[in-house]
Image: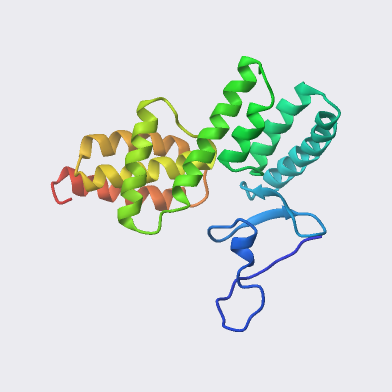
Amino acid sequence: MLFCHVTSHVEGDAYQGLLQEKGGRGFPYLAWMDAEGNVLAKQGDRSVEGFEKTLKTLQDFLALEAKAAKGDKEAGVDALIAGLELGRYDAGQAKERLGRLGEIPADKRQRIDSLLVNLEVDAVMADVRSQEQAIEAGKKFLAMEKDGRVPTGRTALTFYSVILEVHADNKDAKAYEASLGVLRQLAEGERGAARLLKRYEQTLERLKQGDG
């Protein structure tokens, strides 16, 4: 059953804290919930295919969890990966579950590590409320990029958008152009990408002209 809640910020309206209670940080926020209102998965891709993929991953996750509960270690690893893809864990929860799984095949460990990087970026961005905080977050992301720890998917768009804020603050046109090139590739096909990129291109031109 589809359920829609609109946070109106109108005093007296019920459930104004529902967005935060269910793990949302911005609009729009889409999540899958059970009959009791527990969040089962967070929806990223808002296309029909995206919803179908999340439903399939959620069904697989529940089946894998049942197998893992019976002692199937391989299912436990796959359940962790599916749970990370669904946004069911924060970094601490994921690492705690990871610690209980023992040795993991290299290919699956690589996938888990990649998803953990996404969680780390999300955790940093959760505290960003101002331009100054965005620049501080960008400095952390630059260090992560230098170490080869780069997120994937839509999280990568946020990652490089915030890195651009650092380069703009430093008036470093060369670094800005390099990071914008990466972002341009990541944003290909994304909704609203053209407008976003146009703004960044304008900033790059100002930096090249020495106007900051």
Across and down, in percent, residue 78 comes to 72, 28
Identify the image quadrant of residue 7. bottom right
In the rendered image, the vertical position of residue 169 relative to residue 57, given as above or below: below
Does the rendering let one see residue 187?
Answer: no
What residue occupies the far left of the structure in this picture?
Answer: 210
37 or 59: nearer the viewer: 37
Question: What residue appears at the point 52 percent right and 38 percent down from the top-left corner?
Answer: 118
Q: Is residue 151 visible?
A: yes
Q: In the drawing, does residue 88 fall left or right of residue 190?
A: right
Q: Residue at x 77, y 36 (%)?
A: 61
Please give the count of numbered marks on the rendered protein. 0
Q: Residue at x 59, y 33 (%)?
A: 95
Q: Residue at x 70, y 43 (%)?
A: 49
If the image is split into quadrants, where does the N terminus sit? bottom right
The location of residue 193, given as percent across then percent down, is 45, 48
Left or right: 142 in relation to 59: left
- Image quarter for residue 21? bottom right
Q: Position of residue 148 (x, y in %)?
A: 41, 25
Residue 65: x and y, percent?
80, 35
